[in-house]
Amino acid sequence: MDFELSEEQQQIKMSVREFAQSEIAPHVMEWDESQHFPIELKPKLAELGLLGVIFPETYGGAGMGYVEYATIIEELSRVDGSVGISVAAHNSLCSNHIYQYGTEEQKQKFLIPLASGKYLGAWGLTEPSAGSDASGTKSTAVPTEGGWIVNGSKNFITHAIHGDICVAMAVTDKEKRSKGISAFVFEKGMQGFSPSKKENKLGLRASETASVVFEDCFVPAENMLGDEGQGFVNAMEVLDGGRISIAALAVGIAQGAYESAVRYAKERQQFGKPIAEFQGIQFKLADMATKIDAARLLMYRAAWMKDNGKKTTKESSMAKLYASEVSVNVCEEAIQVHGGYGYTKDYPPEKYWRDSKLCTIGEGTSEIQRIIIAREVLRQL
Ligand SMILES: Cc1cc2nc3c(=O)[nH]c(=O)nc-3n(C[C@H](O)[C@H](O)[C@H](O)COP(=O)(O)OP(=O)(O)OC[C@H]3O[C@@H](n4cnc5c(N)ncnc54)[C@H](O)[C@@H]3O)c2cc1C
């Protein structure tokens, strides 16, 4: 067992940290205030290989594994969770669905531009009436000459507006319920496929979250992704990888908030000394550090298992559940350490706290993670 990143992994971590510090940190609050989605970062993210982290170089990717991927998402999110979730949704949802289940032709056509950063990817499972219960998908795909006619909508979709490619699930056989849902690749500009309402969010405000609408949208037969009827099943497997990135998002946000609390505790003087000298504050910092470490270890275990070809349903959910709840708690404690100043936008914790909350909701809520973990635990014993 080895708990250390290799020298190469350490270098990746440091180069992403430097990138986040120089290219993202100066704009964080301005992007947050205005809900500006920083599409201008795309070429820079692509240059560093961050839009194709987990894909082989033959498909335009950086050829790294989930351990490196989690490290990268953590480092981006330590500075801005909005960029973290954007890179995560692009890599482990849209692009990975194509990598895992696409034909060679689909990988050539869609994965290469996605992984090399020419295209930005979106992934649509959630619908207005099918959130936690995604098997209740209502969007339909009806066969027609040469393809399918899709009608319906998806909401809360990351990159719904700027995405060039959207992988989305629709019902192809209602009778078969979850085994009657298929995945399709939608391309920007297809007639009848358009973005809709952009959400005005609590946190991660610089990430783009909007709806997409399908109105008699013709999708050619060659754009069906994976086998007919396997879209939901494959989506659940895609989420096993995606949840590792949400754990990394949560750990990064918590780490950023924790560091700001430590800095502040050393600077802020009350009763004639830095508040870091009070045991009440020290205990908070100790608990924060311990919880972040435990969350990070769960994240790395799931990432390591994924890299070693093991099934990670339980471990991904455990990492995602624990890290996201720790993140909200650590960010809240970071506000407390800052006192009244923590309640203002002049200090970082309030934004970290707003951002952290998504981690308990996206890619399956905490309640859904507990259902998954319990199902796996009961099956195993
Ligand atoms: C910023 C953001 C980005 C997102 N990005 C994407 C994306 O790119 N693609 C995508 O497809 N989706 C995306 N989502 C959607 C996200 O995955 C869903 O919001 C999430 O799965 C929950 O669905 P819901 O919002 O409909 O809540 P609901 O399912 O309506 O849940 C409401 C409450 O009921 C609880 N609940 C539901 N069922 C049960 C149960 N059986 N037992 C106990 N409690 C239960 C939930 O835990 C929750 O507390 C995003 C969401 C947000 C906010």
Image: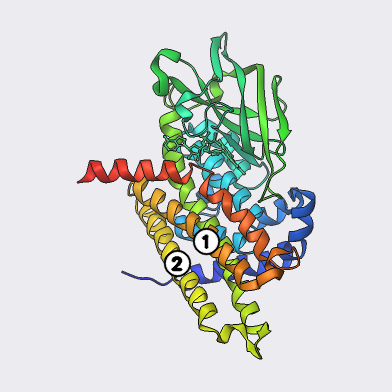
Q: Position of residue 96 (x, y in %)?
A: 50, 42
Frontmost residue, 304 versus 358: 358
Q: Marks 1 and 2, Cα distance to the nearest angstrom?
A: 9 Å
In the picture of the structure, the residue carrying the numbered disc 1 is 329
Q: Quadrant of residue 291?
A: bottom left
Tell which residue pokes out farthest to the front in this image: 271
SS at circle 1 = helix
**Which residue occupies 61% across, 65% down?**
16
Pointers 1 and 2 in contact (C-beta within 8 Å):
yes
Residue 320 in the image: above or below residue 294:
above
Q: Residue furthest top?
A: 145
Question: Can residue 69 be seen in this snapshot?
Answer: no
Q: Residues within 10 Å of mark 1 (few under 14, many from 20)?
A: some
**Image: 19 above or below 243:** below
Which residue ends up furthest to the bottom in the rendered image? 272
Q: What is the quadrant of residue 219 in the picture?
A: top right
Does dot 2 land on a helix, a strand or a loop? helix
Q: Quadrant of the N terminus?
A: bottom left
User: x, y (%) of residue 270?
Assistant: 66, 85
Q: Relative to 237, does residue 22 appear above or below in the rendering?
A: below
Of callouts 1 and 2, which one flags the residue occurring earlier in the amino acid sequence?
A: 2
* Side of 262 where 42 appears, left or right: right
377 w.r.t. 168: above or below: below
Residue at the image point whose x is 67% and y is 85% from the top: 269
Q: Which residue is mark 2?
A: 291
| Direction from residue 50 to residue 371 in the image, left or right | left
Query: Residue, x 51% and y 73% (percent of image)?
Result: 284
Crowd tier of the residue under label 2, counting other residues whose Cα lies within 10 Å: few below 14, some 14–19, many 20 or above: many
Q: Amino acid at mark 1?
A: Asn
The percent position of residue 48, horizontal first and vertical second, equals 63, 59
Colouring method of the image: rainbow
Report whether residue 188 is seen: yes
